[in-house]
Image (cartoon, rainbow, N blue to C red):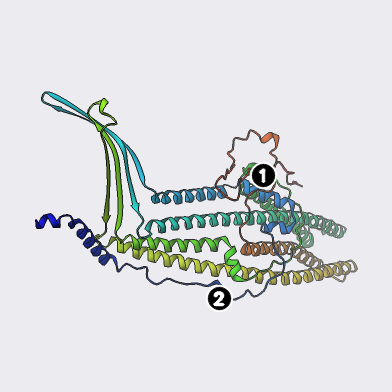
Amino acid sequence: MTNRHRSPLFPEWGAGISLLILIAVTGCATKGPQPSFSANTLPAFSAGGEASASDRWWKEFQDEGLDREVNRALGGNFDLATSLQRLRAARAVTRRVSSDFFPDVDGLLTGDHSFRSGRNRTRSSFGLDASWQVDLWGRIQSRVDAERLRSEATKADYHAVALVLSAEVARTWFLLIESYAQLDLLKEQLVTNLDGLKAVEGAFANGGQGGSPNVLRQRQLVESTLEQFTVVKADIEVLEHQLAVLTGQPPQEANYEPGRTLPDLPPQPATRLPCELLYRRPDVRADYLEYVAAEHDLDAAVTDQYPRLDLTGSFLNSAEQPEMFFRNWALGIGGQLIGPILDGGQRQAEVERTRAVRMQRYNEFRQTVLIAMQDVEDGLALERYQEQRIQKLQEQLKLAKQASAQLSQQFITGDARFLDILSANQSQQRLQRTMLSARLELILIRIGLYLSLAGDFDTRPEVDIKVPEDAQDDPMPRFLGPRDDEPDGPLQSARPGRIRELPED
């Protein structure tokens, strides 16, 4: 009698006692202290302009050629295409982890044949088998949230790649312009130096001093100018190759004519508040999302120490004869409450690992914040001092031109030595080339400042670039980039046509 009365209650008491033991064992699992950070406490930037730059920051230079090449890069660069596929893979991982919210249902079809003395027996069965893990403590939700945040971080990385790509195209474009401008300047200097050589040779021809040191020095200056021609032409060819690869084209067909005049510097963009910068910059946002994802990983690791409830169910039909199919059905429902008791410290070690990873991500985020603010401050300082340097170079060039003109007059009257004229000409020509390089450097500094302040932009090319007829059957693969799952829209392919080649003369 006693056993008959206790047996119905024994499973309930056993389950309750087991649950109490599991909770007592896992009750010490905690996340530990959580770091905190407030962007509102960051100090303001030291300086900045008042202009509001466009999201497509390169348009501030008002260069149609640059705009065209950036669009080609957005549609054809393979690094950007790789980053996009990485984003799609991250989103697929999020969907895969989210599937744990739903039960797994499998179809079953089995058959067995047994041989006995005097009789063979065949039994077949089919039906459905289902299992579902109940998210008691939010472990599955934490894992899904972590993967979703990592997917968003990957999207921020994608936009960071697009920003860096646009900056690389802009830098290469303006380096090409400066190289063509240097080429034109060298042509002018070569003409001047050749005229000087004729004058020196004529001056000493009557005296039989055609091989004098003065003539040799002037010839050396001519050869030095020709040597600079070689260097600049090599730079142009390499830059064209680089620009072609950035836009997803073969470097063998790279030929560009970007112009020969560097643009004026646009108005300086407003720096705004540091907190706005942190929200805007994709690299900062990516590191922050990685940190928050690590927080959810830690939540999942902690709750993995708690009991787990698994529900199972089956709906099967079995029969020995075909005519008995659909007559013998069986429905089974069950559940398991599983909790760790002894695992050799595996789960606790995982908690400690994820806690360390969380602090690692936090420190990486804080470092990225400091680097982001340093980028802005460096850009502002470099631009300010570069403008001062250009002013000093302009004054030097003005004085060098005056000195060269006066020495030329004095040489005619015999009051100046040829060596003084040669030195003045070399100084003037060197300053002219340095001035071009300084103006280019100022533009490159501004590109860096735009990049340090820039945020996301629509990565779709704005214009369609027509493909030349002779390139329609090009076997080289192109990145078409269908982006059905990317909110920014589809990418398009683009290919530049043949542009006038670099003159050899």
Q: Using the rendered view, name the quadrant where residue 284 is placed.
A: bottom right
Disc number placed over residue 41 in the picture, else none: 2
For this view, does 324 lie left or right of residue 194?
A: left
Residue 66: x percent and y percent? 70, 52
Residue 198: x percent and y percent? 84, 56
Residue bearing the label numbered 1: 254
For this view, does 119 lie left or right of residue 282?
A: left
Disc number placed over residue 67 in the picture, else none: none
Residue type pointed to by label 1: Ala
Q: Residues within 10 Å of mark 1 (few under 14, many from 20)?
A: many
Measured Cα–Cα span from mark 2 to mark 1: 49 Å
Residue 48: x percent and y percent? 68, 71
Q: In the figure, 389 relative to 161: above or below?
A: below
Q: Which of the two marks, 2 or 1, is nearer to us in this view?
A: 2
Which type of secondary structure does the marked residue at label 1 adopt?
loop
Q: Residues within 10 Å of mark 2 (few under 14, many from 20)?
A: few
Q: Does the CB distance between marks 2 and 1 fall below 8 Å? A: no
Residue at 63% over, 33% down:
473
